[in-house]
Amino acid sequence: MDSTPPRKPATVICCGQVVLDHTFRVDEVQAPPSKTTARGYNLGIGGMGAHAAIAVVRLGGRALFWGRVGDDEAGAAQAEALDAEGVDVTHLRRIPGAHSALSAVIVDKMGERAIVTYRGDGLSPDPSWLPLDLLAEAGAVLTDPRWPEGSHVVLDAAAAIGLPTVLDAEKSEARILRDLVPRVGHAIFAATGLSVFGGGAPPRESLRRALASGPLKMVAVTRGEDSTLWMVPGDDKPREMPAFPVQATNTTGAGDVFHGAYALAMAEGQGIEAALRFASAAGALRARDGATPDRAMVEALIGTLIAA
């Protein structure tokens, strides 16, 4: 019998957004005015940081979620859903009198989605309660731009102790992205987020601007079914990480899972290229199945690429 103790799971602290998603499946997303009959409905957890935290756990890591919800029914459901997934919600702050974030997600028959998000009300931006001393227990930190005050504080504190940091640079206000990107070690943009950050400049130029904005170790932009472009200091032009070819059924959360997988890979000490491949496989499986994969599924998909 093998008496070797199991490896301790790498820990990722995810600071950011949690949402309660109302997902409707339709044949087509029609322009208004319209009335459409849904073929299916699901109520579940959403939000960039929350999806990423769940991905960390399912991929074999340990996730702590730092964020804010209201003291309403939706907030209770969000906390219960994260806890049920194995995410540590000890420091999920419930704010009296606040309303939690909600989304309506419309998914068409091709797996593409349209999202309407209510970001909540009364969710105090004050980050002074964050337990920054716990950063010493983590292997990496992931933040998103939906709570910029919290992300700002966490990124600075993590950088001070040399902890790897990852930013989910989704579409946001330019001022927020331009504040957070220079504070992070690894900035991974959505195409819309990169366009906002770069003022509409081509991806190559926008990535170069991001890389030059601070002591970043890597910048990248995910492009759905197309390759991920990425750069490290010294690169003159972007490198490419090929996307895994899958038939998408629901792209909701695929980018969030990509970011969670990348952050876990950083916490485990993987190299940048290996981490991007790992994240690409995890995101592709999420888009294919509409569900976050486990470690064995991701490693099997990567294995098919290596075998080819």
Image (cartoon, rainbow, N blue to C red):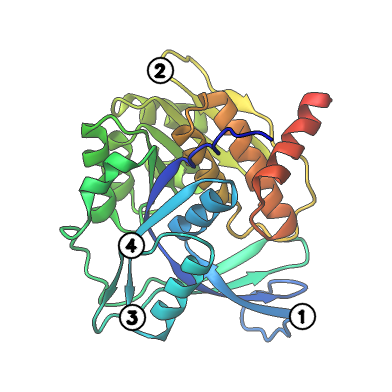
Looking at marks 3 and 4 on the same chain, the residue that comes earlier in the sequence is marked by 4
- Mark number displayed over residue 39: 1
Above/below status of 21 relative to 136? below
Query: Which residue ends up furthest to the front in the rendered image?
Result: 1
Label 2 SS: loop
- Mark number displayed over residue 99: 3
Residue 308 vs residue 89: left or right? right
Q: Could you tell me which residue is drawn at 39 percent across and 37 percent down?
A: 139
Looking at marks 2 and 1 on the same chain, the residue that comes earlier in the sequence is marked by 1
Q: Quadrant of the N terminus?
A: top right
Question: Between tags 1 and 4, which lies in front?
Answer: 4
Residue 45 vs residue 26: left or right? left
Label 3 SS: loop
From the top left corner, tell me how far across and down residue 143 is, in percent: 37, 48
From the top left corner, tell me how far across and down residue 268 is, in percent: 49, 33
- Distance from disc 1 to disc 3, alpha carbons, whole Å, reads 29 Å
Residue 74 vs residue 222: left or right? left
Q: Does residue 237 appear in the picture of this structure?
A: yes
Give amino acid for label 4.
Gly
- Distance from disc 3 to disc 4, alpha carbons, whole Å, reads 14 Å
Question: Between tags 3 and 2, which lies in front?
Answer: 3
Q: Circle 4 is placed at which residue position?
A: 67
From the top left corner, tell me how far across and down residue 97 is, in percent: 25, 84
Q: Quadrant of the C terminus?
A: top right
Q: Could you tell me which residue is drawn at 21 percent across and 40 percent down?
A: 157
Label 1 SS: loop
- Mark number displayed over residue 233: 2
From the top left corner, tell me how far across and down residue 44 is, in percent: 57, 73
- Distance from disc 1 to disc 4, alpha carbons, whole Å, reads 33 Å
Give amino acid for label 3.
His
Looking at marks 3 and 2 on the same chain, the residue that comes earlier in the sequence is marked by 3
Give amino acid for label 2.
Pro
